[in-house]
Image (cartoon, helix red, strand yellow):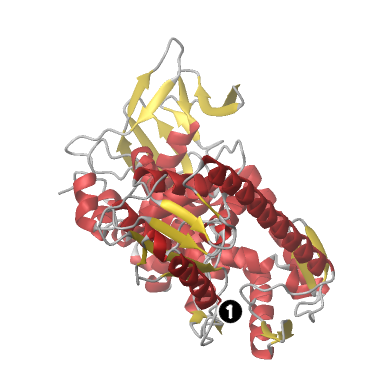
Amino acid sequence: MKPNMTTGKGFRCVIYTRKSTREGLAQDFNSLDAQRAACEAYVQSQAGERWRLDPTFYDDGGFSGASLERPALRRLIDTIAIGQIDIVVVYKVDRLTRSLTDFAKLVEVFEARNVSFVSVTQSFNTTTSMGRLTLNVLLSFAQFEREVTAERIRDKFRASKEKGMWMGGRPPLGYDIIDRRLIVNPSEAKRVRQIFERYLANRSVFELMHELKRRDVRNKRWTTQSGREAGGFQFSRGALYYLLQNPIYIGRIRHKDQVYEGQQDAIIEQALWEKVQAQLGDNRVERSTQSNAKSPSLLTGLMVNAQGARFHPRHANRRGQRYRYYVAPDATLPAHEIETLVIAEVSSMLEDQSTLVTILPAARWSNLQAGLEKARDIGRQLKAMSCRKILTRILSKVVIDVNRIDLHVAVDGLHALISGIEAIPLDNNQSDENVHVISRSIQLKRSGHGKRIILGQSKDAESTRADPSLLRSLARAHCWFDDLKAGLSYKDIATRDGIDQRLVARTIRLAFLAPDITETILKGREPQNLTAKRLLKIARLPADWSAQRALLRLV
């Protein structure tokens, strides 16, 4: 590369400086100033070659060289793109980048505009092939140094955790950070103990979350090093799971899969901790056999055909993937579709006040408002966790016919669940006065050469039932967004729920849909081609609501 002589005044030079941390930048003469002074002196020494210094500053203070996402560097690249620079001057090569891959990208930008690159302390430039070879070698060593430094930091972090030291991050509820140590905060410690005790009383994280919301119990609020106030949010379900399983409260420190004795005082007694972990374990076993298992069968014992023959759960494995079905003498139904539809219908019933009052007359409510609120909580829990226990207490049976599905709601069972009465055994053949039937039209279509039947909800002008898959995706989006606000990362959520981290990221975007789009989906009035699969496959969902409506054809 040879610089262009675009003006009669000489070669236009700019200086780029960078410092990885912000430490010392407030000084009158800092590291960026020192780099610039050395570069200015070098440019002045080339006055005979007609080098001319551009006075514009391109300084990145507090930015790592491991990435090209730096404000001053982006401005520099934009200026190069419009042909206003001939030579880029830096103090050392690693000030521009520490990555060989990133440097190759920058070289392409420089060559496209015939721009030279000069390092004043390493006596070379990119106008010759030897200069470029030398530069590549130096960058390889810079990248090697960065990787070795990262390994050294990770080793030091692990060694410190093994000694029980607190290594920074968000301070946990119950502790204050004083001199880089965790010191018990008495008032917050009391709050932590109450959360553990209330979990044992509720026996459900979901119920605990709603109790804490009613009592306006919030997570820790603290001041960051920059002086910004952070935290103080209501607890999400994920944040409560994290708190209840955090060994820091029994005086220990976790590092990846290992737990070490910590230097902080314990807040929770060992006996209480063990009871909580045992209850969490029991709930995990229950979910694994009912709702969150790899092969759950939520409707086992409930589904029958029009002749009264039971559907039985079956599965098939193909190429490492498990496919689940419900099988009766005359039909084979894919499990996911039928379960999603049933959950959506039952949840909708629980969250619809007018429907509930129709099913359960006012005389059966001891406290109407409290009962309706409890029903809404149960509906949200069902959508979030697909809990078989709720379905078996509400439904006496699910009847599948050729063109419709009938959900038989046991009135006594629904009343007992909402009122908090102990579960009563349900009879699949209850009298008509004790059953409320929800009927929905469906389409059963044959597929392939076998007897497999696909369940599909009709989407005609008279049917405005919400798409269960879309409902579940929206519920997940808002639930996971609450987890993010509570301090969990995408990786934390994916690990907890046993799913791919990319699916979490794609799904959370749905929490930012325009309110009217969300309402359209909830009412089942979206276009026929607007499916959950299509929404999640959109590469970039616009932040502007008008652009969202145009993209989804909802204008």
Q: Secondary structure at mark 1?
A: loop
Q: Which residue is mark 1?
A: 23
Q: Nearer the viewer, residue 520 or 32?
A: 32
* Residue type, label 1: Glu
Can residue 244 be seen? yes
Position of residue 312 relative to residue 14, above or below, is: above
The residue shown at (73%, 86%) is 183
| Residue 407 screen position, x and y as percent | 40, 41
Q: Residue furthest front?
A: 48
Number of disc labels: 1
Quadrant that contains the N terminus:
top left
Left or right of 373? Residue 121 is right
Q: Nearer the viewer, residue 220 or 148?
A: 148
Is disc 1 surrounded by few (<14), some (14 to 19) or many (20+) residues within 10 Å? Answer: few
The residue shown at (49%, 67%) is 42
Q: Nearer the viewer, residue 200 or 146?
A: 146
| Residue 310 screen position, x and y as percent | 52, 28
The residue shown at (80%, 69%) is 160
Residue 380, quarter of picture: bottom left
Can residue 433 be seen? no
| Residue 461 screen position, x and y as percent | 16, 37
Q: Nearer the viewer, residue 347 or 229?
A: 229
Left or right of 203? Residue 93 is left
Q: Residue furthest top?
A: 449
